[in-house]
Structures are given as structure tokens and as C-alpha cells.
Amino acid sequence: MSHTPHELREEFPELVDRIHELKVSDAHFHRISEEYHTINRQIHRAEIGEDHLSSLDEEDLRKRRMLLKDEIYGLLKGD
């Protein structure tokens, strides 16, 4: 398996325990972290040429990933 950048544990290494805690205890956090993971994989597959996306579709996925990452960070920090 190839290395996939932007995994949550890599983005927030200091919050790995909190990520696990919220995935188990918070259904909303679990759902958005799974959506983030799915989108991240789609982007990665496009980057390595495994899947073909239009540049507009890839840009939309990147924007959605960024929004999810911001929401996830807010939940991790307790905002």
C-alpha cells in the first residue's frame, strides 16, 4: 500500500488519542472523520493516476476535505 498524505493522525499527531476517543464516543465526529478519510483516499487515487477525475471534481473534493478538516480540528480542540 502506498503512503497516503493527509491522514488525520499525520495532520494532528499531538491529538491522536483525542481522535480515537471522539471516534468512539461521538457519532458526528465518527461520521465526518469517515467522510474525510473517504475523500482523502479519492484525492490520493486521483493523484497517483489510479482514478481519473476532472480538475473541477478534484478541486471540489479538496475544498470539501479542507472544510471537514477545519470542522474536525474544531471538535478536537473543543470549540
Image (cartoon, rainbow, N blue to C red):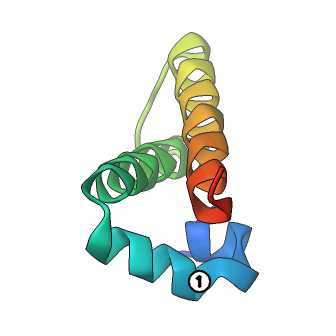
In the image, what residue occupies the spot 74% across and 83% down?
14
Quadrant where the image shows the N terminus: bottom left
Residue 13, position in %: x, y?
Answer: 71, 81
User: Vertical placement of 24 versus 40: above or below?
Assistant: below
> From this viewpoint, which residue is outermost toward the top?
56
x, y percent for residue 34: 34, 55
Residue type beneath disc 1: Val
* Residue 5 position by quadrant: bottom right
What residue lies at 68% left-to-right and 62% top-to-bottom?
A: 77
Total number of numbered discs in the rendering: 1
Q: In this rendering, would 43 be left or right of 55?
A: left
Q: Where is residue 42 in the image (x, y as percent from the top left)?
A: 43, 44
Residue sitting nearer the eye, 54 or 78: 78
Q: What element carries label 1?
A: helix
Residue position marked by numbered label 1 in the rendering? 16
Residue beneath the point at 54% across and 29% down: 64
The residue sitting at 66% across, 79% down in the picture is: 15
**Residue 75 higher or lower than 8, as above or below:** above
Binning the other alpha carbons within 10 Å of mark 1 as few (below 14), some (14 to 19) or many (20 upward) gives some
Residue 23, horizontal then vertical, whole percent: 35, 70
Q: In the image, is 65 to the left or to the right of 30?
A: right
Name the outermost residue toward the front.
Answer: 79
User: Is residue 48 shown to the viewer in this render?
Assistant: no
Q: Can residue 73 be seen in this view?
A: yes
Residue positioned most to the bottom: 17
Q: In this view, does 9 lie above or below 26?
A: below
